[in-house]
Amino acid sequence: MNEEISSLVDGELQGPLLDRQFARLKNEPEVRAAWDTYVLIGDAMRGHIAPDICARLVSKLAEEPTVLAPRARFPERKTIATWGMSLAAGAAAAALVIWTVLPVTQEEIQFAQKAAGAQMPM
């Protein structure tokens, strides 16, 4: 729908498509609202907006209430205990990785060789 309205605004529709879009503009409020938006965007891009629109916008913004944001919290300083816990967590993670990656035991290798029927030199 928006492509057809854009094409209509740009003067690219002809024939039955043009007639259908005009009928929709006449009968459908949401199509009319989209048309108004596209025309306003086109006018703004070409610089055809009334010069007082900027002054009206500034006055409306001046009427808006000022919203004060809460003060930003600064992150807590890391203490020796915090660093120690971080190092311990890293060491635990490294130990877990090493534990899972370590080669399997000699018994498991022999079992795998028997299961596969292969003879691997030791």
Image: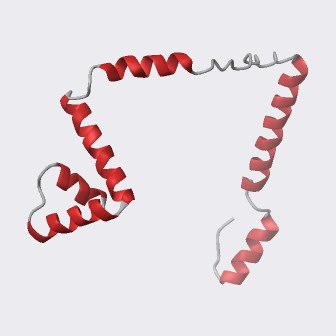
Q: Point out the image quarter for the N terminus.
A: bottom left
Q: Residue at x 80, y 62 (%)?
A: 105
The C terminus - image quarter: bottom right
* Residue closer to the observer: 17 or 101: 17
Observer-nearest of 23 and 106: 23
Relative height, residue 116 to residue 102 (above, below) = below
| Quadrant housing residue 104 | bottom right
Q: Which residue is rendered at x = 35% and y = 63% of the image?
A: 28
- Rendered location of residue 2, percent (x, y): 30, 57
- Asked if residue 99 is positioned above or below residue 28 in the image, the reply reads above
Q: Residue reaching furthest right?
A: 81
Q: Is residue 66 left or right of residue 1?
A: right
Given residues 62 and 104, the one toward you in this image is 62
Horizontal placement of 35 versus 117: left or right?
Answer: left
The residue positioned farthest toward the left in the image shown: 15
Colouring method of the image? secondary structure
Q: Position of residue 3 (x, y in %)?
A: 25, 57
Give the left or right position of residue 106, taking residue 54 as reference: right
Q: Looking at the picture, how far across and down is residue 64, in whole percent?
A: 57, 21
Residue 101 in picture, x, y percent from top left: 72, 54
Q: Could you tell me which residue is drawn at 23 percent across and 39 percent down?
A: 42
Residue pictured at 20% horizontal, 68% vertical: 20
Up-down: is 99 above or below 47? below
User: How many marks can you see?
Assistant: 0
